[in-house]
Image (cartoon, helix red, strand yellow):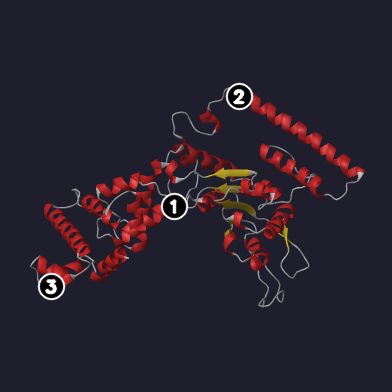
């Protein structure tokens, strides 16, 4: 990213206009004293900027008067869906996406901003795919063949922050046994992704702002500066604007980073993508685990389509991998984590009933065996819970050999100890 100055920047778009405004604003904010010639120079640039903005405003008004269809302005041919149009324009996206208007809007913004070097701020709940969106912006831009360097700002100790981001010279501090590049140097020519930017301490925010303004870094322990050319994409799951109001995030850095601001919708807001993602991650898990693609009973599939996924796409992916690993060819409701069943409002008995729903992939004999197994487990669980895990007493009451009863318990993963502990806990 080339350094911007009042002399070399020519406004051709709203993005450029915003950068010029920010440049003038910073000049006024940080200058300790302005000479008369500098004031005149600033006024000249402000007048030029005013003329450029008026020109852009007239262009926008002309477009409205001409009543250009929305499809044509976004590059979408009449009769084609926005999703189809994106794909046909060779838009690179790792994964799948549906027809959610909110998501398509963010992808169209990403497509437009990708060829530029403007900083981008991405926000959204945890697990919505902020890093994936950063990679989409990188891949669809002119830096796509260069490095993409990801940094988790919340995982770096404050005393190592400067060294991690900007590097250090040998001997700069105890343990610095050789020169080391920082993340910004590693991303030179490419993109640096600053994840969890809201966790960056104030001292780190000051140093990052300096890099954004000067396009230079200085290694810890070094006297010279190093020019860098890295596009910055930042992400957060926090409300940075509120943090600015609270004084925990610098206002000038916020406006520097958010020239382009993208908000990712949660998975709850784009339910049409759930079946697409289930299939996509099922295939991915099969390849990763060396197994067959996941098959699900209709009951499980219905519940997964109803589930609200508080952890968003990350939770869905992890859930599919779990089901692929633990299910024996066909996943059903019993393979869901207890927490998910609880959030779905399923009791243990209801989950068992859901699991034996008739499925076209099972033969009649398989269905009978599955129903018998579920009935056995339910009966033993209830009986052991009622008698506090006393196996001998249960064997006598149902007239069954004790060793055979223990074999059945082992088959169903039941332990008498668990029921004794449960009984003690209730008594207390």
Q: Residue at x 17, y 59 (%)?
A: 379
Q: Which residue is mark 1?
A: 311
Give residue 77's mark.
Answer: none
Q: Earlier in the sequence, mark 1 or mark 2?
A: 2
Say what secondary structure mark 1 lies in: loop
Q: Which residue is mark 2?
A: 64
In the figure, 376 relative to 106: above or below? below
Q: Earlier in the sequence, mark 1 or mark 3?
A: 1
Q: CA distance from mark 2 to mark 3?
A: 83 Å
Q: Residue furthest right?
A: 36
Rendered-image quadrant of the C terminus: bottom left
Q: CA distance from mark 1 to mark 2?
A: 41 Å
Give neighbour class at mark 1: few <14, some 14-19, many 20+ (Cα, 10 Å). some
Residue 111 is situated, as x and y percent measured from the top left of the image, at: 55, 43
Q: CA distance from mark 1 to mark 3?
A: 45 Å
Residue 381 is situated, as x and y percent measured from the top left of the image, at: 21, 62
Residue 14 is situated, as x and y percent measured from the top left of the image, at: 67, 37
Task: Name the residue nearer the viewer: 344 or 104.
Answer: 344
Residue 286 in view, yes or no:
no
Image quarter of residue 148: bottom right
Q: Which residue is mark 3?
A: 402
Say what secondary structure mark 3 lies in: helix
Residue mark closest to the camera, 1 vs 3: 3
- Mark 2 and mark 3 residues within 8 Å of each other at the beta carbon: no
Q: Residue at x 29, y 47 (%)?
A: 301
In the figure, 423 relative to 339: above or below? below
């Amino acid at each position: 990213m080339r350094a911007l100055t009042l002399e070399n920047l020519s406004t051709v778009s709203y993005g450029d206009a915003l950068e010029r405004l920010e440049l003038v604003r910073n000049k006024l904010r940080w200058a300790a004293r302005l000479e008369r010639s500098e004031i005149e120079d600033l006024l000249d640039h402000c007048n030029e900027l005013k003329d450029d903005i008026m020109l852009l405003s007239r262009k926008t008004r002309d477009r409205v008067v001409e009543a250009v269809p929305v499809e044509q302005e976004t590059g979408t041919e009449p009769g084609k869906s926005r999703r189809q149009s994106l794909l046909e324009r060779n838009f690179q996206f790792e994964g799948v996406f549906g027809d959610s208007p909110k998501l398509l809007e963010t992808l169209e913004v990403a497509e437009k901003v990708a060829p530029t070097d403007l900083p981008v701020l991405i926000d959204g709940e945890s697990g919505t795919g902020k890093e994936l969106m950063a990679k989409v912006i990188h891949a669809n831009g002119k830096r796509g063949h260069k490095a993409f360097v990801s940094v988790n700002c919340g995982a770096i100790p404050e005393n190592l922050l400067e060294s991690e981001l900007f590097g250090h010279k040998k001997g700069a501090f105890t343990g610095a046994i050789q020169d080391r590049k920082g993340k910004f140097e590693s991303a030179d020519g490419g993109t640096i992704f600053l994840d969890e930017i809201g966790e960056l301490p104030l001292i780190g925010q000051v140093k990052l702002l300096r890099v954004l303004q000067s396009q230079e870094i200085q290694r810890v322990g070094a006297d010279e500066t190093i020019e860098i050319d890295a596009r910055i994409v930042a992400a957060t799951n926090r409300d940075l604007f509120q943090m600015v109001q609270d004084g925990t995030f610098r206002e000038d850095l916020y406006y520097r980073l958010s020239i382009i601001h993208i908000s990712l919708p949660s998975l709850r807001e784009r339910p049409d993508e759930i079946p697409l993602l289930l299939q996509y991650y099922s295939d991915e898990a099969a390849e990763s685990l060396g197994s067959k693609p996941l098959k699900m009973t209709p009951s499980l599939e219905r519940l997964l389509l109803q589930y609200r996924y508080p952890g968003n796409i990350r939770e869905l992916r992890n859930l599919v991998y779990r089901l692929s690993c633990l299910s024996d060819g066909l996943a059903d409701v019993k393979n869901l984590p207890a927490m998910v069943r609880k959030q779905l409002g399923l009791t243990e008995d209801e989950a068992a009933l859901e699991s034996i729903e008739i499925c076209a992939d099972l033969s009649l004999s398989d269905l009978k065996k599955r129903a018998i197994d579920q009935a056995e487990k339910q009966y033993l669980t209830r009986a052991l819970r009622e008698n506090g895990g006393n196996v001998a007493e249960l064997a006598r009451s149902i007239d069954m050999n004790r060793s055979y009863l223990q074999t059945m318990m082992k088959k169903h993963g039941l332990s008498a100890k668990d029921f004794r502990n449960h009984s003690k806990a209730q008594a207390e």
